[in-house]
C-alpha cells in the first residue's frame, strides 16, 4: 500500500454499510467513499486532522450508500461524484430504494459524472474509475495502486445482489471477472459491506466465482 495513503473505515446505518475516508497524508487532501449515513465522528475526524475533503465518491446510488451525502456536501463543500448511469438514483426514491419504507432520500444532482477509465487525484494519489455494473447499471469500483474499493460488486466470499431494479447477474459476474479478478492476487478489496479481502482469496474461496 502507498505509504502516504491513509484509510479510515466507518460502519454506518441500518444496513451496516462501509464508509471510507481516504487521505493523502502528504497534502492532507481526502475523499469520502459512500457516506451511507452522516455520523458526527466522521466530520470530527476530518476536522481534527485538518484534512481538506476534495471529493465525495459514490460506488452506486442505493440508499445505504448515499444517505449522508447531502449533509456532508453542505458541511464541507466537496463535490459529489457518481457514475453517469446511476445519476438519477440520487434524487429518485424509487430508484435508490428509499421509497420502500426507510424514509425517502432525495439528494441534489451530482457535481461530477464518472465513466469507466476516468482518473481523479487527491494530492499525489491517483484514483482510477472502473465501471463494474450488475448490482446497479452504474456500479463502479475505485482503484488506488493495489487497492480496490468495490462497493456492492464484490464482497468477501460473496457478490452484490442482482434482484433489485437494474440488477443483472450476468453483468455482475462479467464485471468481476473482466475488471476485478484480472488485478494482482495481492490486491486488497475494501467492500461496501463486510470485511476486507484480497483478489487471491476471492479466486479460491468465493463460491460465486467458481
Image: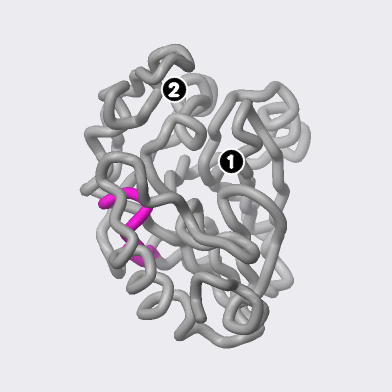
Judge whether 107 appears above or below 186 on screen.
above
User: Of 133 and 5, which appears nearest the observer?
Assistant: 133
| Magenta highlight range | 129-137
Residue at (71, 56) in percent of width and height: 195
Q: Residue at the spot x=52%, y=26% of the render? A: 68
Q: Main secondary structure of the magenta part?
A: loop
Describe the element under mark 2 as helix, strand or loop. Answer: helix
Would you place residue 168 above or below residue 147 in this image? above
Asked whether the residues under the numbered discs 1 and 2 touch, taking CB atoms below 8 Å apart as contact, a structural biologist would say no
Q: Name the residue tied to disc 1.
A: 52
In percent of width and height, residue 173 lies at: 38, 70
Residue 70's label in the rendered image is: 2
Examine the rendered structure and indicate whether residue 77 appears above or below residue 188.
above
| Residue density around tag 1, few if under 14, some if 14–19, many if 20 or more, within 10 Å | some
Q: Nearer the viewer, mark 1 or mark 2?
A: 2
Nearest to the observer: residue 22 or residue 106? 106
Rendered residue at 56%/75% (across/down): 145
Residue 37 in magenta stretch? no
The numbered mark, 1 or 2, whose residue comes first in the sequence reads 1
Q: Is residue 92 left or right of residue 101?
A: left
Amino acid at each position: 500500500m502507498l505509504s502516504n495513503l491513509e484509510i479510515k473505515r466507518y460502519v454506518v446505518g441500518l444496513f451496516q454499510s462501509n464508509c471510507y475516508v481516504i487521505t493523502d497524508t502528504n497534502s492532507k487532501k481526502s475523499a469520502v467513499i459512500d457516506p451511507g449515513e452522516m455520523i458526527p465522528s466522521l466530520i470530527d475526524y476530518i476536522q481534527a486532522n485538518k484534512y481538506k475533503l476534495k471529493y465525495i465518491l459514490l460506488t452506486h446510488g442505493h440508499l445505504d450508500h448515499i444517505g449522508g451525502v447531502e449533509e456532508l456536501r453542505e458541511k464541507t463543500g466537496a463535490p459529489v461524484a457518481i457514475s453517469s448511469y446511476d445519476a438519477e438514483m440520487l434524487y429518485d426514491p424509487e430508484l435508490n430504494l428509499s421509497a420502500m419504507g426507510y424514509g425517502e432520500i432525495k439528494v441534489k444532482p451530482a457535481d461530477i459524472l464518472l465513466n469507466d477509465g476516468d482518473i481523479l487525484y487527491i494530492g499525489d494519489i491517483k484514483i482510477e474509475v472502473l465501471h463494474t455494473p450488475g448490482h446497479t447499471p452504474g456500479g463502479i469500483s475505485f482503484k488506488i495502486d493495489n487497492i480496490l474499493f468495490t462497493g456492492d460488486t464484490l464482497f468477501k466470499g460473496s457478490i452484490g445482489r442482482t434482484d433489485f431494479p437494474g440488477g443483472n447477474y450476468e453483468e455482475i459476474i462479467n464485471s468481476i471477472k473482466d475488471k476485478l479478478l484480472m488485478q494482482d492476487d495481492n490486491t486488497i478489496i475494501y467492500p461496501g459491506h463486510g470485511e476486507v479481502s484480497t483478489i487471491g482469496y476471492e479466486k479460491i474461496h468465493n463460491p460465486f466465482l467458481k
